[in-house]
Image: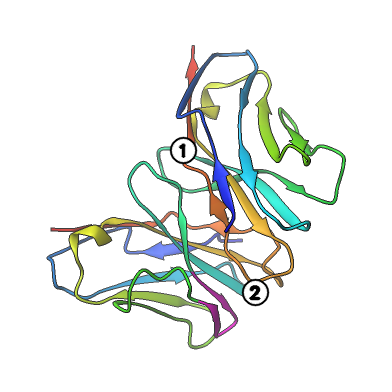
Amino acid sequence: GAGVSQSPRYKVAKRGQDVALRCDPISGHVSLFWYQQALGQGPEFLTYFQNEAQLDKSGLPSDRFFAERPEGSVSTLKIQRTQQEDSAVYLCASSTRVPTDTQYFGPGTRLTVL
Amino acid sequence: AQTVTQSQPEMSVQEAETVTLSCTYDTSESDYYLFWYKQPPSRQMILVIRQEAYKQQNATENRFSVNFQKAAKSFSLKISDSQLGDAAMYFCAYRAGGGADGLTFGKGTHLIIQP
C-alpha cells in the first residue's frame, strides 16, 4: 500500500506569510506525528494525534504553529506569520493503533522562509 | 527529559567491511523503545531496526544488528558487509513506553561508504 505522503514537497514563503503543510498518513493508521528537522539536526517532535484528538502539542514552538486532523485521517500543519527561524524540513509520521508501534515517515516538506 | 547522544558526526567504512555507530541515551523510565532510522539524501526516514527495552536479546535485521546495554544506556548499531546503498544519515531514537510521546532523536551520524 501507499506510504505516508506530504505536500507540497517544497515551499518558499516570504516572512510574514501563512503556510499550510499537508500530511496523508498510511490508510488505517490511527496515530499521526509531526516533527521539525532543522538543517544538520535530528527531527524534533512537534505534536501528536490519535484519530482526530490532538493528545500532545508540547513541542509546538509558538502559538503561530497550529495543527489539525479534523476527520482522523489527513492532517494539516499551519504556520502563521512565518519567520526565518521556521525554515526547516517538516516531517509527518504515522503508526497503527498505539503510539509505541513503529512510526513510518513521509518524505517531508522543506520550508524556506525568505 | 530524555536525551539521545550520537557522538560520531561522521563515519567512513570500506565497502564490505563492518562499521559500528554509537548511541547513548538518558532516561529514568524502565519501559521504553529504541530505534535506528536511516535517512538517505532523498530525505525519507526509513526504520532500520527496533529494540524493546524489556527484551534482553539484541535485535537483528539481516546485516544490521544492535548491541543494547541497558545498564550503560548504550544502543549501538552494527552494519556488516557494508554496501554503497547504506550511505546515509543514521539517527538513533528513543521513545518512552505507554505514553503518547513522540520520538526523541539524536543529531545523527553521516555514514560514508568507500568503494
Q: Is residue A59 above or below residue A42?
A: below
Applied colour scheme = rainbow
Q: Residue furthest right?
A: B56
Look at label 2 and name its amino acid. Gly
Question: What label does residue A28 carry, if any?
Answer: 2
Check if residue B90 falls in the magenta segment: no
Q: Pick the residue in front: A2 or B82.
A: B82
Query: Could you say which quadrant of the image residue B66 lies in?
Result: top right
Look at label 1 and name its amino acid. Pro
Kindly report the distance in space between the C-alpha atoms of the residues bearing marks 2 and 1. 27 Å
Q: Quadrant of the N terminus of chain B?
A: bottom right
Query: Could you say which quadrant of the image residue A85 lies in?
Result: bottom left
Same chain shared by disc 2 and disc 1: no
Q: Which residue is mark 1?
A: B40
Q: What x and y, as percent, mark residue A13?
A: 17, 64
Chain under disc 1: B
Residue at figure coordinates x 53%, y 28% from the top left: B85
